[in-house]
Image (tube, helix red, strand yellow):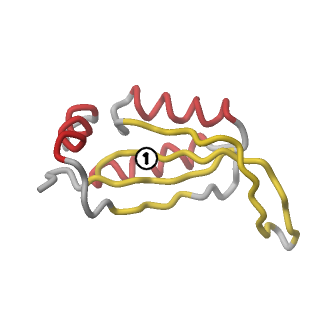
Amino acid sequence: MNINNPLLILTTVSSKEEGERIASKLVNNKLAACVNILPQMTSIYRWENKIHNEKEFLLTIKTAKYHEQEVYDYIKDNHSYDVPEIITLEIKKIDKKYSEWLNSSIRPME
């Protein structure tokens, strides 16, 4: 059983530098145990009635349910997009040792 209800939060950013800035802050503040910055990818989407074809980076943020809103708020307050993608995936199963590491790497529930 995982007492912290681990989550994976996804967001996309326009540059590696923006991703590193957001990731570093989340990890430094112990809101996330780890953030992966996946290499540049192509995103095709509709925005303001136009189709866009842009290069983006994907951040995968490992955290706990009790930090979810803080992570969302930080991303929204520090993101270059007007409407950033922020999606939470619940983790149904996690390795016990990895879960223990995750628990020890984030701020405890207040």
Q: Who is closer to the viewer here, 28 or 99?
A: 99
Q: Work out which quarter of the rendered image holds the N terminus and state it.
A: bottom left
Residue 17 drawn at (x, y percent): 67, 30
Badge 1 marks a residue whose secondary structure is helix
Q: Is residue 26 left or right of residue 66?
A: right
In the image, 36 versus 51, the foreground residue is: 36
Residue 51, image quadrant:
bottom right
Q: Position of residue 40 (x, y in %)?
A: 71, 43
Residue ranking furthest to the bottom: 49
Task: Name the residue that disc number 1 marks.
Answer: 71
- x and y, in percent, of residue 110 in the image: 19, 42
Locate residue 47 relative to residue 6 in the image: left or right: right
Q: Is residue 21 above or below residue 13?
A: above
Side of 16 where 45 appears, left or right: right
At horizontal 71% and vertical 37% (from top left) the residue drawn is 15
Residue 59 placement (x, y as % from top left): 55, 45
Residue at 69% x, 54% y is 82
Q: Quadrant of residue 92?
A: bottom left
Residue occupying image coordinates x 24% and y 41%: 98
